[in-house]
Amino acid sequence: MTPILKSIPGRPSGKYAVRANSGGFCPATIYLSLFLLLCLHTGWLPAAPAPAEEIPSITHEKAYPESMPGWPDAEITLLTNAVNQPVHIAHADDGSGRLFIVERTGTIRIFHNGQILADPFLDISGRITFSGGEQGLLSVAFPPAFAAKQYFYVYYTALETGASIVSRFGVTADPDRADPTSEEIVLIQPQPFTNHNGGQLAFNPVDGYLYIGFGDGGSGGDPDNYAQTTTTWLGKILRIDVESGAAAYAVPADNPFVGDPLVLDEIWAIGLRNPWRFSFDRATGDLWIGDVGQSTWEEINYQPADSPGGENYGWRITEGSACYNPNPCSTVGLTLPVWDYSHITGCSVTGGMVYRGPANSLAHGIYVYGDYCTGIIWGLAWDGQAWVNRELLDTAVNIASFGQDEDGELYVADRFGGIYRLHLTPRYGDANNDGQVDTSDVLSLAAFLGANQASLSAPAGIADVNLDGVINAVDLTILQHRLVDNITQLPHNG
């Protein structure tokens, strides 16, 4: 596919000027809006004014309040297919611009300067079993200040035993080669079955601790109810301190169950079936979890950064928001998902990441995730009153994982051989933020210019279709041209 390229840079999100009477409806604006709407139906429009020699600075005559993110246009482009069963993508935040791609078969490859390096960053394939479809080398995590520390952490299932192992490895004098003999085991979790290993490692950008995701031990239906059993790590997310210098790791004193003899100290959250990819919002520290369902529901769980931990996400009492075992059930004390979808729509959720990249600041705050079976990529965002979910792109990819680079741009791993860049570009003109540019956007923009701020539900920059930093009748005229003749492309500054 051909990458989407923006020839006209967008203005940064923030406050936009609006040419309107701040004391109420401006009659001239209303008359102009009605005139332009009439033009839309008759097919006649005045020519757009000639552009100024310089794009003026953003003015602040009328500040537009913060709104939900603007739904973007989405496209994927292939970066490389020179990988084998990629299941995780990470960066080291060391300024190198490298992407680290975890191959389930036991190697970590580096993508740098447009290509996969010939030699693997790490090869521990001789220590790993991947005979089960959910086993293998499953993730890598780089600690804060990795550039100075030069060590990192991996999660894999061990040869012979199938146990889940979290280990630390050091880097050699060659920054693109790790030392496979430097392994220090942090912890081991025996696994009763080959599936539902979880496998995610991630450092919280706020507290600096390492979070580890374990599935419920496998089989089907959590036969031993491990996810609700607090004397095992299975079906949990752990929170540990691996950077304190203590042997192996230390337990943070503010972990939610420290001192409770009925709960293991490392546990941060319980009630998870198979958390296949969780991530932290790099800007806020909020935790997002994609938890794979049993046979009916897939779910997304959300934990705000100020949570003290201890959430019970429900499994096996619930699958998604529905009762599972027992059925009927009580959901008192459970934290239900902020979003779930049925197996009519997909079959296996792949948790994603909150978009914070520089290419489209108007989309900041959208949680991007997907489904392994269907290849659909969705966005999930809070509109101030409720969670809103929208399909962004339907792909042919078996989505094994999402990743991000040092800047916050997103990537997608295809389990069967490809790494893709996900492009999220502003959908200029979508003033009512419904995912389409149509007549309703003209109505919303006209009402907005008539001093009805509530009519513009997209970020203000979406309505600034000529990128001059001011939302006014010129933008309305250009939008009308776009809808009538379908020639004027957005954004448009000429």
Image (cartoon, rainbow, N blue to C red):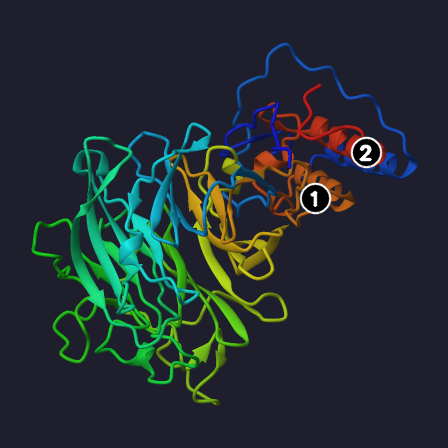
Name the spot of residue 449 as percent of width and height, x first.
67, 36
Residue lying furthest right: 42
Q: In which quarter of the image is residue 156?
A: bottom left
Residue 241 can be seen, yes or no: no
Numbered badge on residue 486 = 2
Name the spot of residue 252 as percent of width and height, x first.
15, 59
| Distance from Cα at disc 1 to Cα at disc 2 | 19 Å
Residue lying furthest top: 53
Name the spot of residue 343 as percent of width and height, x first.
59, 71
Numbered badge on residue 197 = none
* Residue drawn at 21 percent across, 54 percent down: 167
Q: Residues within 10 Å of mark 2 (few under 14, many from 20)?
A: few
Q: Quadrant of residue 234?
A: bottom left
User: Is 238 left, or right, of 439 in this rendering?
Assistant: left
Name the spot of residue 327 as percent of width and height, x first.
48, 89
Amino acid on which disc 2 is placed:
Asn
The residue at which mark 1 appears reads as 444
* Residue drawn at 63 percent across, 44 percent down: 456
Q: Residues within 10 Å of mark 1 (few under 14, many from 20)?
A: many
